[in-house]
Image: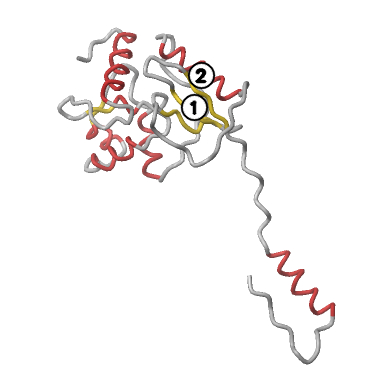
Amino acid sequence: MNQPKLSSTRAAPAARRAAPAARRAAAAPAAPESAASVAERYLPSPLGELRLIADDDALLGVYFPRRGQPSHEPTTPKRHALLDQAARELTEYFAGQRRRFEVPLRPVGTEFQRQVWLKLREIPFGETWSYGELATAIGNRNASRAVGAANGQNPHSIIVPCHRVIGADGSLTGFGGGEPAKRWLLDHEAKVAGRRLF
């Protein structure tokens, strides 16, 4: 910030200099609090090691191998309540003992993306929707392409089940973890639910 120039003939009295400074200090926004610490953990799974990212308040992401590189620099603590919970729930899911997740999430994205991600959680376990059906569910049946793009940016793989969205012709498209992982997840859920998808 440029400093105000003082007159070359005489300095202003101290009281006059102090008053504007005090007003500026009062108007200035408070210094932001330090960011919550961010932690990570790698969880072995049937689909490879999953990278879990969390802060003190919520799970920030679940990433497949080589997918998703958060901008923050996480630590790797031995114990972390939310990472422990996420790891436990995912392990139960892979064992066929859990259909819904309870770990708190904080997805970061646009309003439209968050709307899509929220609606994804309404797709029943063991079932699939098409991109068109998902677009209709959010109130914009012509937004299939945009819905697909938002689906691909979902930061909470598996927990927010973007894998349950398929092409109108049944094709397994648009999954960041890859088609084999998407097929595995859908087969797994169908078996647990006593259904057959393919």
**Where does residue 23 sit, x and y in percent of width and height?**
73, 70
Residue 127, picture quadrant: top left
Give 157 or 43, whichever is nearer the viewer. 43
The image quarter containing residue 36 is top right
Q: Residue at x 61, y 25 (%)?
A: 77
Give the side of residue 111 with respect to residue 52, left or right: left
Q: Hey, what amino acid is under mark 1?
A: Leu
Is 4 drawn above or below residue 80 in the view shown?
Answer: below
Q: Are marks 1 and 2 in contact (CB under 8 Å)?
A: yes
Numbered marks: total: 2
Is residue 110 rendered to the left or right of residue 126?
right
Secondary structure state at the residue bearing disc 2: helix
Query: How far across and how far down the image is residue 4, in percent?
Result: 69, 79
How busy is the neighbourhood of tag 1: few (under 14 within 10 Å), some, or many (20 plus)?
many
Residue drawn at 39 percent across, 27 percent down: 64
Q: Which residue corresponds to the image point at 23% horizontal and 30% vertical from the top-left?
A: 173
Element assignment for label 1: strand
Coordinates of residue 29 in the picture (x, y in percent): 66, 59
Disc 2 marks a residue whose amino acid type is Ala
Query: What residue would you read off at disc 2?
Result: 87
Q: Which residue is mark 1?
A: 52
